[in-house]
Image (spheres, rainbow, N blue to C red):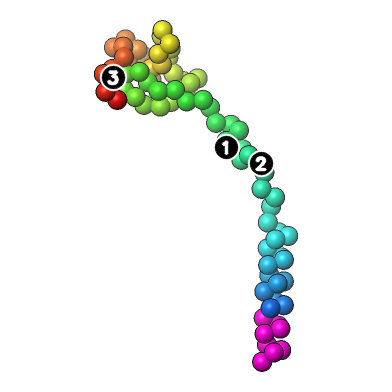
Amino acid sequence: MLRLLFWIALIAAAVWLWRKIKAPASPAQSPREQDAAPMVRCAHCGVHLPRDRALSLEQHWYCSQAHLEQGPGSSGR
C-alpha cells in the first residue's frame, strides 16, 4: 500500500512539474489592454465608441452625423 501511495505522489509531482515548466510566463499586461482605444460616450444616445471614430463638437462626442446635428439628448441617461 505504501508503494502505491509513493508512486501516485511521484506521478502527481511529475505532472505538476511538467505543467509548470510548459506554462508560458504571463506578461504584465495583455496585448488587448495595451491596444485598447480610449472610449467616449455619445452625447445624444449614450452609446460608447472609440474616440477616433467619434465626431466632436463643443466638447461633446457623437456617434454619427445625425446625432451631431440633433445635439445632446435628454440628461436622464
Give the CA separation, mark 1 to mark 2.
12 Å
Q: Which residues are magenta?
A: 1-8
Quadrant in the rendering for residue 16: bottom right
Q: Is residue 41 left or right of residue 36?
A: left
In the drawing, what numbered circle is on residue 32? 1
Question: What residue is shown at x 29% (from left), y 12% (from top)?
Answer: 70
Residue type marked 3: Ser
Quadrant in the rendering for residue 43: top left
Mark 3 and mark 2 lie on one chain; the one further toward the N terminus is 2
Residue type marked 2: Ala
- Quarter of the image containing the N terminus? bottom right
* Helix, strand or loop: magenta stretch: helix
Mark 3 and mark 1 lie on one chain; the one further toward the N terminus is 1
Query: As displayed, is residue 52 above or below residue 13?
Result: above
Q: Nearer the viewer, mark 3 or mark 1?
A: 3
Helix, strand or loop status at disc 1: helix
The single residue placed furthest to the bottom in the displayed view is 1
**Which residue does the numbered mark 3 point to in the structure image?**
75
In the drawing, what numbered circle is on residue 28? 2
Give the CA separation, mark 3 to mark 1.
33 Å
Helix, strand or loop status at disc 2: loop
Counting other residues with Cα less than 10 Å from the Cα at mark 1, is it few (<14), some (14-19), or many (20 or more)? few
In the drawing, what numbered circle is on residue 57? none
